[in-house]
Structures are given as structure tokens and as C-alpha cells.
Amino acid sequence: MLHVLNHPLGAHILTHLRDRTTKPATFRTLAYQVGLLLALEATRDLATKDHIIDTPLEKVTSLVLARPLAIIPILRAGLGMVQPFTDLFPDVSVGYVGLERDHVTAVARSYYQKLPPLADKRVIVVDPMLATGGSAVQALDVLRAEGATELFFACIVASPEGVRVVEAAHPDVPIFTAALDRELNAKKYILPGLGDFGDRLYGT
Ligand code: PRP
Ligand code: URA
């Protein structure tokens, strides 16, 4: 269920996201661009239904999207992946789950939640960094409890440990990532990674 982006542009963008000299304004643009690639991958198999229209020349049965989409960024860094989805899917619903990792234990604490109805939708959780997997699993648990039945997870950098933890807790959830990195360090940061995504996105 792990899908690693395989696109030369994705690799190019990641190089500049990882570069410590990249400034927040450029970092935000790069996050948007790789978010577009991930949004396309995570929706490649969306259901469609017939829709009859008149072209200027004749009537034709064509296709439109059949199932509504919801995107749930994990605050705060997940906000950097929202606009690609709202630009591509204007009817998308957006909900929020606020989680923050404790700096010492790396365990995530919940501080905010605001969700649209989820039952009839493809629900894509977005969070750029999948490190220990604790934040992702907490968010997926919440969304399942709130009625989500079709859950996806999209991130920019994943660790092997994080992938294993999400797969163990939510084996039916496809994971889309732009990169699968080597490991976590002692402070549970991803190596080689790109540092603290939220801090680099917002210049904090
Ligand atoms: C970061 C990141 C993820 C989480 C990943 O958020 O955006 O949410 O860590 O780590 P995990 O897989 O070990 O749970 P952080 O807690 O730093 O908050 P922020 O988004 O507000 O910066
Ligand atoms: N959160 C981040 O922003 N970066 C990491 O490497 C791990 C968690």
C-alpha cells in the first residue's frame, strides 16, 4: 500500500526542499509543487460516472468525478499541502486535525479538530513528514471514529519506521510519499530528511 512518487520533477523539487539554504518563500512554493504531484497520484483511481453534454458539434456521454473528496491537513505543517488539492479539486471539503509532537518524547498531543462529514468521501490526510508514525496514526484513528471509510495518507518524506507503524495500525490505508528516507535519528527526525518542515515552511 506504499506508493513512492516516481517523477523526475518530484526528485528535483525534493533536492531543493532538503537544501538547508532554501528560504521559506521558496520552500512554500516547492511544497505546493510537490503537493500537486502527490494530489494527482493519490486521486489517480477516483471513481467517475457518465455525464451527458452537448459539445458544439454533438451530444456525447462523457465522465465527471463521482465521489466527493475531503482533505485533512494535520496542523500545522500539513497546511503546506492543502492548496494543491483545493486548486485541483474546487469542490473538496477541508477539515483540520491539530497535533503537535512533544520535543522530548516525540509523542503527538491533540489540540484542535474541525471536520466535515466524512462517511461518503475519499478522505486524504496530508502531513509532509511521516516520522515515528504517531501523528498519522492518531489522525487516522480520529477520522475513522468520525465515520471515514475510505482513508488515504499523503506525505512528502516518510521514514521506514513510520510506514511500518501506519501499515500495522491501518493496513487498508494507501500511503503516498514523494520520498522514502533512510531512518530516524535519536530525536526522531528523519534522515536525511529536510529538518522541521513546519519551521521551514513558516520561518519559525
Ligand atoms: C511534525 C510533522 C508531523 C509530525 C511527524 O509536526 O508535521 O505532524 O511531526 O512526526 P511523527 O510521525 O513522529 O508523529 P510537529 O509536531 O513538529 O508540529 P508542526 O506541524 O506544528 O510543526
Ligand atoms: N517532523 C518534522 O518536521 N521533521 C522530521 O524529520 C520529523 C518530524
Image (tube, rainbow, N blue to C red):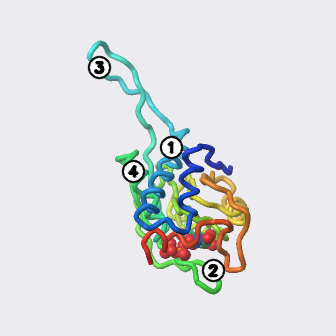
Q: Spatial distance from mark 1 to mark 2, Cα to Cα?
A: 31 Å
Q: Is the residue indicated by label 2 positioned so its CB lies within 8 Å of ligand 1?
A: yes
Residue nearer the viewer, 160 or 12: 12
Q: Spatial distance from mark 2 to mark 3, Cα to Cα?
A: 56 Å
Which residue is the site of mark 3?
A: 54
Tell me the amino acid under the disc marked 1: Leu
Which residue is the site of mark 2?
A: 106
Q: Spatial distance from mark 4 to mark 2, Cα to Cα?
A: 31 Å
- Label 4: how many residues lie within 10 Å, few (<14), some (14-19) or many (20+)? some
Q: Is residue 116 above or below residue 46?
A: below
Question: On the picture, is 102 further left or further right than 184?
Answer: left
The answer to whether one can see residue 99 in this image is: no
Instruction: In the displayed orientation, state which residue is furthest to the left.
Output: 56
Which residue is the site of mark 4?
A: 92
Q: Spatial distance from mark 4 to mark 1, Cα to Cα?
A: 14 Å
Tell me the amino acid under the disc marked 4: Val
Q: Is residue 155 above or below residue 9?
A: below
- Sequence-first tag of 4 and 2: 4
- Label 2: how many residues lie within 10 Å, few (<14), some (14-19) or many (20+)? some
Residue 175 rendering spot, x and y as whole percentages: 62, 54
Residue 87 rendering spot, x and y as whole percentages: 37, 48
Q: Is mark 4 on a helix, strand or loop?
A: loop
